[in-house]
Amino acid sequence: MTEIKILKFISKHFIAIVPYCLIVLCLLSLPVNAGVLDECYKIYSVDADNLYMSALNVLSSNGRFEISEIQTKNGYILFSTGSKYYLLTVTRRYKNQSEVKVLPQNSDYSQGSSVASAIFNLLDSEIKKPMELVK
């Protein structure tokens, strides 16, 4: 009897389950060094909105990066350096704690995280600056 219930559930939710299964299978098949992924994110004691604006300022003021797309609602910035594209996301973890991730768009982690560390260094210096109110 339970097999019938399981089959009914799978047949009813098949269309909703398949994309997630495919994503999991694709992610499991990627050869990713866990150490590289650890270097691609950093946690800041700053509100997510302020951190997003600081990241946008860092990317737009530096001539090395070219911004391709900005999505403020979801908190991501698509940018390139040379011929490689990267995705920067800002995620709220707690009230005044946010996380920044800088990941290559094509999921090729072979180049290491030099771009991510450069952005984190620029963000560190940007956050330490006193904020000025614009009137």
Image: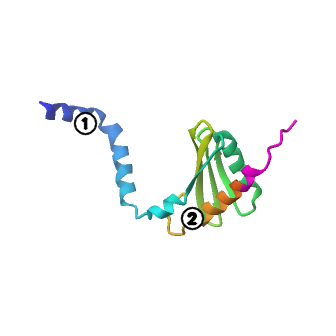
Q: Is residue 49 left or right of residue 21?
A: right
Image position, residue 39 (x, y; %)? 54, 60
Q: Which mark is residue 10?
A: 1
Image position, residue 34 (x, y; %)? 44, 61
Q: Amino acid at mark 1?
A: Ile
Total marks shown come to: 2
- The alpha-carbon separation of the residues under discs 1 and 2 comes to 41 Å
The residue positioned farthest toward the left in the image shown: 1
Q: Is residue 130 above or below residue 118?
A: above
Q: Which mark is residue 113?
A: 2
How crowded is the residue under tag 1: few (<14 C-alpha within 10 Å), some, or many (20+)? some
State the extent of the magenta-drawn residues as a range.
125-135
Residue 3 visible, this angle: yes
Q: Residue at x 63, y 39 (%)?
A: 96
Element class at badge 2: loop
Q: Which mark is residue 61?
A: none
Image position, residue 80 (x, y; %)? 64, 60
